[in-house]
Image (tube, grey):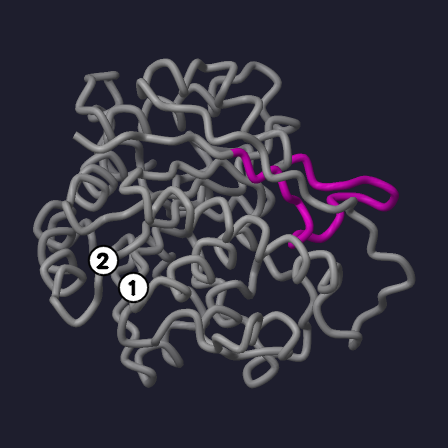
Amino acid sequence: MRNFVVIDAPSNLGLRPPAPGTVPGCYKLAGALREQRIVQRLGAFEGGVVVPPRYDRGDWKEGDGVFNAAAIARYTPRLADRIEHHIRAGDFPVVLGGDCSIQLGASLALRRIGRYGLAAIDGSADFRHPGNSERIGAAGGEELALSTGRGQRDLTDLEGLRPYLRDEDIRLFGIRDYDGDREELARLRIPTVTVGELRERGVAGQAEAMLLSLEAPVTEGFWVHLDADVLDPEVMPAVDSPDPGGLLPGELAVLLRALVRSERCVGLNVTIYDPDLDPEGTAGALLTDLIVEALTGTATGTDAGGDTPS
């Protein structure tokens, strides 16, 4: 049995401010899940905290590229150091974000070691880049593009390792059926399975089919990225972009369980849940239950509720 190691990566550097003069609250994700006793329930070891630079967009304006880029470029290798250490030791890192830009740390760590894939469970593709958008700025909506070498060089070519991920080694699960990046992703032959497709074809079957391709010997393994906004806002309203038409807990439970229990899965990161938008803590409790059940097999009741939202 693998040793789970919980690492806090409380960075909000990749998101736009929710309101003028404020900062995104997703940096509190790790603390909120720890309040749900995620470390104890996983039987995990402590991996410590990788403290991010301060959130400060300065005089950034539209057209200046990715904001907080210098801070993200400093933070990413430090987070990669921590993740790399535990992967080389044979541990299973569980990285608690943070916004989606922390995925760059995992991707860089894996690129240092060899060739790895990515299974992204996300409500959106996060594939915005200068080739398809003029509204570049928030790395949290661009991390998949940055990881594949699309975007400004100070983020895409850290340590001269561009790209951190190859297009053909990526699988996307749970994006909305109306996601605007689907056409480009199809041209690039990056496989995607939308919410509608998961329901039409069956979550378990689709997970198994994608898993077979992720487990191909061309890579040394794969990482799982879990963005809380893959869940429908009816059950997970505490995200920065609560788009309708997402997965329900029972559906996500089946998908996440299939991926993280693969012997080829080397780690997991969790992002975007914002405790500031969850005053009762119910969404955080649900997210913790889903992660614990997927990793340990401990029943939490989250397999219920697989019907399509009304």
262 w.r.t. 276: above or below:
below
> Residue 165: image x %, image y %?
38, 70
Q: Which mark is residue 116?
A: 1
Which residue sits at x=31%, y=67%?
Answer: 114
Amino acid type of the residue that numbered disc 2 sits on in the rendered structure? Gly
244 w.r.t. 148: above or below:
above
According to the picture, the residue beneath numbered tag 2 turns out to be 221
Looking at the rendering, which quadrant does residue 4 occupy?
Answer: top left
Q: Is residue 191 rendered magenta in the image?
A: no
Q: Quadrant of the N terminus?
A: top left
Instruction: Give the residues drawn in magenta, as a range.
Output: 8-25
Q: Report the side of 16 relative to 248 (left or right).
A: right
Query: Is there a contact, CB below 8 Å, between mark 1 and mark 2?
Result: yes
Q: Quadrant of the C terminus?
A: top left
Q: Is residue 10 rendered magenta in the image?
A: yes
Q: Earlier in the sequence, mark 1 or mark 2?
A: 1
Which residue sits at x=60%, y=39%?
Answer: 50
Label 2: element kind = loop
Amino acid type of the residue that numbered disc 1 sits on in the rendered structure? Tyr
> Residue 117: image x %, image y %?
29, 63
58 w.r.t. 17: above or below:
below
Distance, label 1 to label 2, CA atoms, is 5 Å
